[in-house]
Amino acid sequence: MERAVAARLAFKTVADTKVALAVSVARNSGYSGFVESLSVTAGGEEVPLTELSDHHGGRFHYMEFAEPSDVLVEYTASVTGFAVPEEPRLMELIRYVRPSRYAESDRLLPTAYAEFGGLQGGELLHAVRNWVFSELRYISGSSRGTDGAVETLLHRRGVCRDFAHLAISLLRAKNVPARLAAVYAPGLSPMDFHAVAEAHINGAWHIIDPTGLAPRESMLRITAGRDSSDTAFLSTVGGSLSLTQLQVTAVVDGGLPNEDPAKLVALR
C-alpha cells in the first residue's frame, strides 16, 4: 500500500513564542519506502527546527520566534508498505490504563460496567465502538478545547477527539489499556487531522474509530499518547499564536479499503 499525505498550516505569533509542531508521519522500520519534506518559513525565511522524538515513533518539531511572525508550514510524505507492530512495554500498559486529563475513566467506571458488564477482548472493543457511535453526534466545532470525556457524554456531541476520549475512558474503566492516536486518514470527509483510539488486547494494539468517518486500514500514525494533550498538531510552550489556515490531504494508491467495524485492525 502506498499513501501520500500533506499538510499546510499558516499562523501568526506574538513576540517570544515557542511552538511544538506534530504533523510528521511517525517513523517505523517496517515501511519499505518513506520520503518526506517539511518546510517552515517566516517572512519567506527558513525557520530553524529542532526535531524531538516522542512515544511510539512520533516526532515533534520545536521552533522559537523572538518577534511577531507570520509562519507557513508545508509538509508532504509518501509512505509505502506497513508499519511493524510495536512491542508494548509494561510501563506503557500501566500508563494507558490510568485516568488522564481528557479521559476521566475513574468518573466513568459506573457507566462502563453498567453498559458493558462482563464483555472482554474484541467483543468489548466492538461494543464500546458501537455505543459511542450511537450515543454521540459528530458536529464540527461543537466542543471546547477543555472538554473531556465526561463533558462529551453529557452533551452527547463532539468531534473526533471527543469520540476517541470517550471510548478510551470506557475501555480504561474496564482495565483495558487505551490511548489516543493522531493520524492521517485517507477517505476522511471533511479532510483534517484525525483522532482515533487504540486499545491493547490479546497482546497487540487495535484501532477504534467511533466516528466511522474513514477506513482504519489506510490510516497513518502521526503520534500517540494518553489523550489529546499529548498529541496536538500545533501547540505553544510559551507565548501565543492564532491559526489562520489549515489544509490536510491524505490519499491511498489503488482505492480505499473496505471498512468492517467488527474487524480488529492495527494502525500500520
Image (spheres, rainbow, N blue to C red):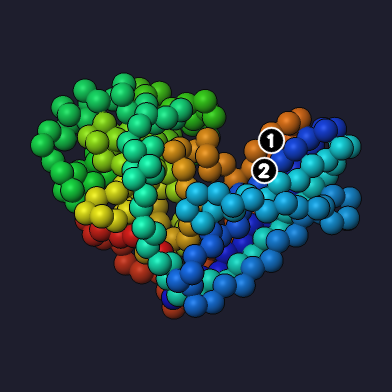
The tag earlier along the polypeptide, 2 or 1, is: 2
Q: Which residue is mark 2?
A: 20
**Which of 155 and 73 lies nearest the eye of the viewer?**
73
Q: Determine the secondary structure under disc 2.
A: strand
**Which of 7 and 31 lies nearest the eye of the viewer?**
31
Residue 79 location in percent, x, y?
53, 71
Give the vertical position of 225 relative to 24 (above or below).
Answer: above
x 37%, y 62%: residue:
85
Query: Image check: 115 left or right of 22?
Result: left
Q: Which mark is residue 62?
A: none
Contact, CB < 8 Å: mark 2 with mark 1? Answer: yes
Q: Label 1 is placed on what type of residue?
A: Thr
Count of labels in the image: 2
Q: Which residue is mark 1?
A: 236
x 15%, y 44%: residue:
120
x 35%, y 32%: residue:
98
Residue 108 location in percent, x, y?
29, 25
**Quarter of the image where the N terminus is located:** bottom left
Residue 112 location in percent, x, y?
22, 30
Residue 101 location in percent, x, y?
46, 28
| Circle 2 Cα neighbour tier, 10 Å, few/some/many (<14 / 14–19 / ≥20) | many
Query: Image check: 152 left or right of 261?
Result: right
Q: Farthest residue in the front direction?
A: 90
x 40%, y 67%: residue:
84
Q: Label 2 is placed on what type of residue?
A: Ala
Query: Image check: 159 left or right of 52?
Result: left
Instruction: Compute the Cα span from label 2 to label 1.
Output: 6 Å
Question: Residue 247's quadrant in the figure?
Answer: bottom right
